[in-house]
Image (cartoon, rainbow, N blue to C red):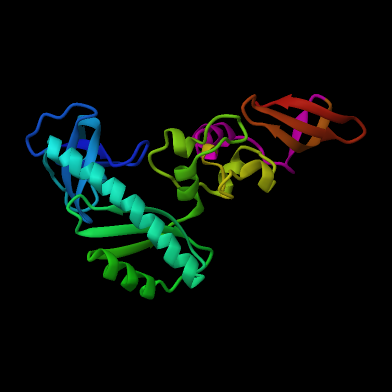
């Protein structure tokens, strides 16, 4: 086990683990940390905890220091300047008629790099755009193409359930969701039913997937023949959570049978 602290860089953003570097850090304390992108200003989301070393990918980065008032003021300036850079970048994209939607901009804390994230249905040659931005801001420019789920997380909205989108409200990591999760839960594979606002499979399909897999593990499949009190019939439907089969028996009709 290794002692770490969880840091997030955005509200409801993904939590990244860092070496606390000897600091006693409480929740919501702001800190400066070293990342692969450079120094970043973040907030403690998960105070000191022990996790298995196999959950750490690569070398664990360290907390550099607890942020000072000057650090906070510099962070606020970075946010303001990044917003202006975002506006300028969108103007350049519009002028060049490039097929990309710039969704946000971010300076690293030390202003060594200016990062733009964008959406596009296709691969985009953004080399000229990067060169133009570098000439204006005199820093390293990075443009990252992201998916529609990241866009939904940034914008927010309301899902089919009437609640705010999970990704915008509390999901810190956007896990992989597969069509098999919908199949496991016996949900009709209708895009309007199983896709979220982002056009991708609903994140909530993952929440109960393990429960459905366990409940379905020893059940017959649709099309199997089973014995009922009315005779041998064919399974035409499942009620997974209630552990029941919908069975069609020749000359009798439809009957429901408990799993034995």
Q: Residue furthest right?
A: 251
Could you say where residue 27 lies in the image, as x and y percent from the top left?
23, 27
The foreground one among 121 and 138 is: 138
Rendered view: 97 above or below 213: below
The quadrant of the picture occupied by the N terminus is: top left
Question: Residue drawn at (81%, 27%), measured in percent from left and top?
Answer: 255
The foreground one among 244 and 157 is: 157
Q: How many marks?
A: 0
Indicate left or right for 25 with 180 as reference. Answer: left
Magenta stretch contains residue 209: yes
Residue 123 visible, this angle: no
Magenta stretch contains residue 12: no
Numbered range of the magenta stretch: 205-229
Could you say where residue 214 lies in the image, as x and y percent from the top left?
52, 33
Indicate left or right for 128 with 72 as reference. Answer: right
Question: Residue drawn at (50%, 45%), measured in percent from left and top?
Answer: 152
The quadrant of the picture occupied by the C terminus is: top right
Question: Residue drawn at (22%, 43%), measured in percent from left and top?
Answer: 75
Rendered view: 28 above or below 82: above
Residue 47 occupies quadrant: top left
The foreground one among 86 and 175 is: 86
Residue 202 occupies quadrant: top right
Question: Residue drawn at (83%, 35%), measured in percent from left and top?
Answer: 248
Q: Residue furthest left?
A: 22
Residue 244 visible, this angle: yes
Rendered view: 191 above or below 66: below
Could you say where residue 4 lies in the image, as x and y percent from the top left?
18, 37
Could you say where residue 219 lies in the image, as x and y percent from the top left?
63, 35
Residue 25 occupies quadrant: top left
């Amino acid at each position: 086990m290794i002692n770490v602290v969880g840091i997030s860089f955005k509200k409801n953003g993904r939590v990244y683990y860092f070496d606390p570097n000897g600091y006693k850090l409480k929740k919501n304390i702001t800190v400066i940390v070293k990342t692969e992108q450079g120094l970043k200003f973040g907030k403690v989301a998960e105070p000191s905890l022990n996790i298995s070393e196999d959950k750490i990918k690569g070398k664990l980065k360290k907390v550099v220091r607890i942020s000072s008032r000057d650090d906070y003021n510099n962070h606020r300036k970075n946010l303001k300047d990044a917003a202006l850079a975002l506006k300028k970048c969108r103007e350049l994209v519009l002028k060049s008629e490039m097929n990309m939607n710039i969704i946000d901009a971010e300076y690293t804390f030390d202003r060594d790099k200016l990062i733009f994230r964008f959406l596009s249905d296709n691969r985009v040659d953004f080399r000229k755009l990067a060169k133009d931005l570098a000439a204006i801001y005199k820093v390293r420019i990075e443009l990252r193409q992201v998916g529609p789920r990241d866009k939904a997380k940034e914008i927010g909205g309301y899902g089919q359930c009437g609640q705010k989108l999970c990704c915008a409200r509390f999901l810190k990591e956007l896990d992989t969701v597969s069509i098999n999760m919908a199949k496991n839960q016996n949900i009709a594979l209708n895009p309007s039913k199983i896709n979220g606002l982002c056009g991708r499979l609903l994140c909530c399909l993952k929440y109960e997937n393990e429960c459905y897999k366990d409940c379905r593990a020893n059940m017959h499949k649709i099309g199997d023949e089973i014995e009922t009190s009315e005779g041998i019939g064919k399974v035409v439907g499942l009620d997974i959570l209630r552990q029941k089969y919908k069975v069609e028996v020749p000359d009798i009709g439809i009957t429901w049978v408990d799993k034995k």
